[in-house]
């Protein structure tokens, strides 16, 4: 058999195996904007994809593709975003009030024509008779010319009093934090006065910097997105991604972090600089193995904290792949990557 035919056959076999749910190793599944949760003895990853992509694993190492959350694009989203075809961005999964809540983003790329929606389920196990995603539609929307923020990249968090909040944002005026209703299914504040909790601008009142790196002009150069807030000890830690994703080998994505004693902030980095004025301590950035790393979540399993994110594989043409690193904390309470940890 010619070498080219052997290579093609191997590719087809691999593709068919993946399509029917073959288990594959972590750092070999292609994901973008991953979040993770565990129900009983099964881990689930939700990420950007048609209808929201889902993977399951018994050990965080071997992953099986599950059916997407939505078989068809939500009708409300098609009506709200004319160019939307079912490719849903940056989901966020949590357990609240006896059910799993999945916030998700629909958007026109490079514009803040965007919405965040919510779907809920009693279980994440597809074989459970109770398994059924219920879509609750739009939670919040940004409109070009009206909103100097972008309603994508949601993250759900509850403060010390049990009050639910949603942080979100990408470019424009930076990262936002809004209070939700007690059932977390609607916004409980004036959307025209949502505070900014992080930005790359040194002056919060300055206009957005000019667009760079071939990004759309209306997005400006305020390259910060993907907020994730994690409570640890006496602090809330705000993780975010800066610079540019989605460019394969040219991606410059990196992760920053700051912390606050209250959920609403202010968030300050290790040097004492507010994240509302361009602050943010670098947690992880690209290297010889990964062109860029970002859009992270932080989870705790059995007393250990993990950083979950995607990286652009320098050894595979810059494809975005799942990464999981153990997260430790230094004596001053700042997160550090455990360089000795490996899932393999």
Image: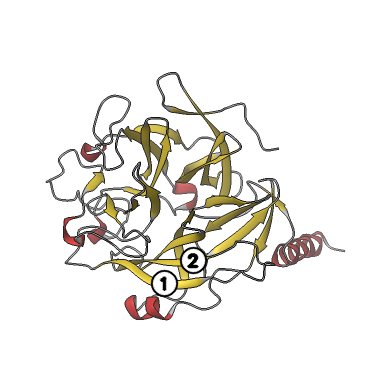
Could you tell me if residue 148 is visible in this image? yes
Please tell me whether residue 214 is drawn above or below residue 326 in the rendered image.
Answer: below
Judge by depth and name the residue closer to the eye, 260 or 217.
260
Residue at the spot x=29%, y=24% of the render? 271
Q: Mark 1 — residue?
A: 136
Q: Position of 321 compared to 164: left or right?
A: right
Could you tell me if residue 317 is visible in this image? no
Residue at the spot x=71%, y=62% of the render? 18
Q: Residue furthest top?
A: 331
**x then y, percent, for residue 151:** 31, 61
Q: Position of 212 compared to 22: left or right?
A: left
Please tell me whether residue 248 is drawn above or below residue 80 in the rendered image.
Answer: above
**x then y, percent, for residue 208:** 18, 50
The residue tagged with tag 1: helix, strand or loop?
strand
Quadrant holding the N terminus: bottom right
| Label pair 2/1, CB-CB below 8 angstroms | yes
């Amino acid at each position: 058999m010619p070498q080219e035919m052997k290579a093609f056959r191997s590719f087809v076999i691999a593709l068919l195996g993946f399509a029917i749910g073959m288990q594959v190793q972590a750092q070999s599944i292609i994901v973008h904007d991953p979040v993770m949760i565990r129900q009983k003895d099964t881990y689930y990853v939700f990420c950007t994809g048609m209808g929201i992509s889902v993977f399951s694993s018994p050990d965080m190492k071997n992953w099986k593709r599950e059916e997407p959350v939505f078989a068809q694009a939500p009708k409300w989203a098609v009506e709200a975003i004319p160019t939307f075809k079912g490719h849903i961005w940056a989901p966020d999964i949590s357990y609240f009030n006896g059910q799993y809540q999945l916030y998700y983003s629909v958007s026109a790329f490079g514009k803040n024509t965007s919405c965040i929606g919510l779907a809920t389920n009693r279980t994440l196990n597809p074989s459970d008779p109770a398994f059924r995603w219920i879509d609750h539609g739009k939670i919040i929307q940004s409109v070009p010319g009206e909103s100097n923020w972008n309603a994508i990249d949601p993250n759900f968090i509850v403060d010390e009093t049990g009050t639910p909040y949603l942080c979100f944002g990408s470019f424009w005026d930076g990262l936002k934090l809004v209070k939700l209703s007690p059932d977390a299914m609607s916004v409980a504040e004036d959307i025209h006065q949502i505070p900014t909790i992080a930005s790359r601008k040194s002056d919060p009142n300055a206009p957005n910097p000019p667009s760079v790196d071939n990004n759309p002009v209306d997005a400006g150069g305020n390259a910060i997105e993907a907020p994730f807030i994690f409570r640890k000890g006496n602090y809330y830690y705000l993780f975010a991604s800066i610079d540019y994703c989605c460019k394969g080998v040219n991606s410059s994505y990196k992760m920053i972090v700051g912390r606050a004693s209250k959920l609403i902030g202010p968030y300050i980095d290790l040097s004492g600089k507010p994240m509302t004025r361009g602050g943010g301590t670098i947690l992880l950035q690209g290297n010889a193995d990964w062109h860029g790393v970002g859009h992270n979540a932080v989870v705790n399993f059995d007393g250990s904290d993990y950083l979950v994110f995607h990286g652009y594989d320098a050894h595979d043409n810059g494809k975005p792949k799942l990464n999981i690193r153990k997260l430790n904390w230094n004596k001053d309470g700042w997160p550090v990557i455990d360089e000795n940890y490996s899932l393999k």
